[in-house]
Image: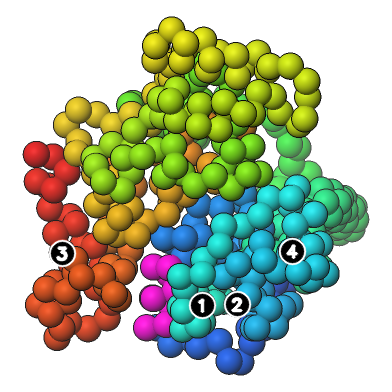
Amino acid sequence: MSIKRSLLSIPSRLGVLAFLFLMVLGTQVFAAHPDVPDDESAISAGKALFNSNCRTCHKLDQRATGPALRGVTERRSLEWAGKFIKNSQALIASGDAQAVAIYEEWNKLAMPSHEFLSDDDVMNLLAYIEYGDKAEAQVAGGDGEGSGGGGGGSGVPSEYLTIILAVLVIVLLLILIVLGLIISVLTKYLNSQNLEEDDKEFVNQKFDLGKILKSDAFVIIVTALVIALVAKTAIDGLYSVGIQQGYAPKQPIAFSHALHAGQYEIECQYCHTGVEIGKSANIPSANICMNCHTHIQNVGGKDGISPEIQKIYDAYDNNRPIEWVRVHNLPDLSYFNHAQHVAVGGIECQTCHGPIEEMEVVYQHSSLTMGWCIDCHRQTDIKSNGNAYYDKLVQLHSESKGSLKVKDIGGLECAKCHY
């Protein structure tokens, strides 16, 4: 029995060593700036700001549309981080070397300005970035840059991930080879000793793959895995019913938001005139297009009339509406008011529609499910400062602790959206 325990303990010990080795390789430690607050109230307030303004493009520990954020205050000064968060485009225009390098690395995608954030808001946001949700953190494959930043970080660059994984695979194979050699040497040694028949049979037992494949345990495990996979696929399919995330229909005119809202910085409200005064944002008519395209007949200084702009002229001359294809569709049972969110709540268009100023072809960025909306109502702070709409509500909740959120003013009531 002692021989059996010795042989069986070898793989477990090597397995523990391999596990510890992988844990050491996979650990990243960031040292936040000492002036960044780490108390729960600051982290909670920062999380609300992050969910409202940053979550669309950023994650704390992974690359997304933008870089991973955790550790930014170790790599950048607090003053620089604050300037970049509030108005990265101004910092880039000033010629700041770090900001320009970030802008170039991320394919010249500039982060929207957040000048409405106070200095305290910025510190709370950095508190959440550095200390928030660490239990959910995963080893980042990106450069671990801060808000809107990239390049020069202390995290593991993504281009090295493949090399690291290959090295780990080689190390594990070497461990298996060494383990096999150890077992071979021990087997020869034990065969040279005077062993009992039971011990000899155990030492010289052969690996029988066919017997394993035919065993009841193997069949049960495979069957359970197949059933679990089928069940997960079915459940995922049910949850995706009615969700059109990523939907990008072909439009009658190849309108580029990246050109109009991005390069030329035309405000969304100029074309979508109802966004601040009504339930719907309104799809622009040919008349609105003609305000500019009466004079702009082509792009990039080209001669003649662009075929796409000619379609606007045709619609205008024939008094015929442009048949735009609706991208964002809510079910009839749901009520959504743009004015309440944009004019009263101060919500940016990008919060729901994503980086619209970067889209050549508009697509549905968010899932727009009930759970997605409820999560936003639970996390979003009411912007009550200087907003007379909320004066009475702020007075009624004056004794409440913490920030006032949408959920606190009826944002989770069924009748608010299902009337």
Which amino acid type is marked by label 2? Gly
Which residues fall within the magenta stretch? 41-49
Depth-wise, is mark 1 or mark 4 nearer the camera? 4
Q: CA distance from mark 1 to mark 4?
A: 21 Å
Say which label, 4 or 3, has the lower sequence index: 4
Say which label, 2 or 1, has the lower sequence index: 2
Say which label, 1 or 3, has the lower sequence index: 1
Say which label, 2 or 3, has the lower sequence index: 2
Which amino acid type is marked by label 1? Val
Q: Secondary structure at mark 1?
A: helix
Q: Which residue is mark 4?
A: 93
Q: Which residue is mark 2?
A: 82
Residue at x 47%, y 60% (from the top left corner): 53
Nearer the observer, 223 or 196: 223
Q: Verify whether residue 48 appears in magenta.
A: yes
Q: Which mark is residue 409?
A: 3
Q: Is residue 57 above or below residue 409?
A: above
Does residue 234 appear in this view? no
Say which label, 1 or 4, has the lower sequence index: 4
Q: Residues within 10 Å of mark 4 (few under 14, many from 20)?
A: few
Do tag 2 and tag 1 residues touch (Cβ < 8 Å)?
yes
